[in-house]
Image: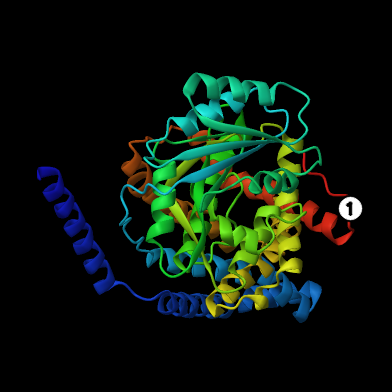
Amino acid sequence: MLAVRNGDRAITAASRREHRWRRFKMRPWGKFLIALCLAALWVSLSAWLALAWVDSIADHAGTVLAWILVSLLALVPGFVVALMGASLAMDRQPPLLVQEPTTPVTVIVAAYNEEAGIGETVRKIVASDYRGQVRIIVADNNSTDRTAELAEQVAAETGADLRIIKEPTPGKSHALNAALQYVDTDLVITVDADTLLHPQALRRLISRMETGPGRVSAVAGTVLVRNSRTNLLTRMQEWDYWIGIAAVKRMQGMYSATLVAQGAFSVYRTEELLRVGGWPDAIGEDIVVTWRLMEDGSRVLFEPTAVAFTDAPAELNHYVKQRARWARGMFEGITAVPPWSQSRVLAKLVASIDFLIPLLDIGYALVWLPGLLLLLLGYPVLVGVWTLLVFPITFLMYGILRHYQSSRVFGQLGLRVRRNRIGYLAFILCYQALASTASIVGYLQFLFRRERVWR
């Protein structure tokens, strides 16, 4: 009886939290309209303040080109940052009402020559505190090493319910779809072969799926960098994953329109995946499948506290290939499922923001960097002293995001932020140059229909 009464008290407490949250919450539509209005006001103020700047550029390039350059340098980035900042200021993550979900799940691990890490990946899945049944399918995508053998060995040691599926056709989507045919649970989770789950990750991810409003077809987890001590490149990526990517997903998630339920760690409803035909044969298969899931009105959420750790590229050429692949995948997603094809108006608007992302990359890599070089040479034609105020504003914004991640995410999981000051400074000052340049490579690959390469 004591256990029952304790359970009743837990349910009552959760109900009270839910009641308080519903009482003071604002609907996503209202939040988006407020954020949109604030962003529009910010851009209007910026355009007024930039009139003298436009005139100075117009003396060299003409009025039309001057406004284009100022838009790429300041107005478009200002709109995107203001929209995201205003949205996150209103973000109030609903409580996880289902604290201990027990729905059976299947975890698919697509693997190609992953003998170095597949064993640890399987062990972390087995070590999860999730109380429901967990089945594991390793989709071996024609590996030439001992990936399958080591996975089976770890399964025998840990008692994992594991199955090996062989898929000879190259491409992650083929491996995932081959495994999907053997899934007989209502929920299916994808985990990359080099990704390690936090012990609470499965429980929190599935709890968000079962807590979410309306018809939820997928929930994206948080993916962070585990090899951040390798070199400066991975140190910078640690901050990108931790505060950059996570912030974007938080904004999209609060509008129930997370644009990428990433293959590295996300949960999907199996029937919804089957409805859209599984993962498409695309360079960004997780992007396209996410947009197809939302196309008929279902929602895709984000759970900040469902954390997994992955290996980020440690070599520059691998990093450029990865980010180019992501950028190209975004264009493939827009082509396959245009934002206007979404049935939910809010999803249309959130997805349409992706049209601005290439402008951000072009503005930074092809206008801001040359302008900064000219400033250093004594020619403040494009970039002036006032423009450099972007740096303190950036430090302030990322400082706020760092505080949220430290207190709201890591604080709940008992994790601590490792010191990485050099990586943080390099992330603020240099990282965007790498990211934008790599993205432009991806855009060009898409435009010129270059051969797709997954690995």
Please state if 450 lies on the left or on the right of 329 as rendered: right
Please state if 307 lies on the left or on the right of 295 as rendered: left
- Amino acid beneath label 1: Arg
| 261 versus 215 height, above or below | above
Please state if 380 lies on the left or on the right of 47 as rendered: right
x then y, percent, for residue 342? 62, 75
Q: Which residue is drawn at 24% across and 73% down?
A: 23
| 225 versus 284 height, above or below | above
x then y, percent, for residue 239? 52, 43
**Residue 159 visible (yes or no):** yes
- In the foreground, 80 or 8: 8
Q: In which quarter of the image is residue 97?
A: bottom left
Q: Which residue is drawn at 53% across and 21% down?
A: 156
The image quadrant where one finds the N terminus is top left
Please state if 287 lies on the left or on the right of 218 as rendered: right
Q: Label 1: state its secondary structure.
A: loop
x then y, percent, for residue 37? 47, 80
Instruction: Give the residue number, with chain letter if any, for mark 1.
Output: 450
Number of disc labels? 1
Q: How many residues crowd mark 1 within 10 Å: few (<14), some (14–19), many (20+)?
A: few
**Residue 388 visible (yes or no):** no
| Colour scheme shown | rainbow
The image quadrant where one finds the C terminus is top right
Q: Which residue is drawn at 48% across and 23% down?
A: 158
Q: In which quarter of the image is residue 271?
A: bottom right
| 355 versus 153 height, above or below | below
x then y, percent, for residue 391? 53, 54
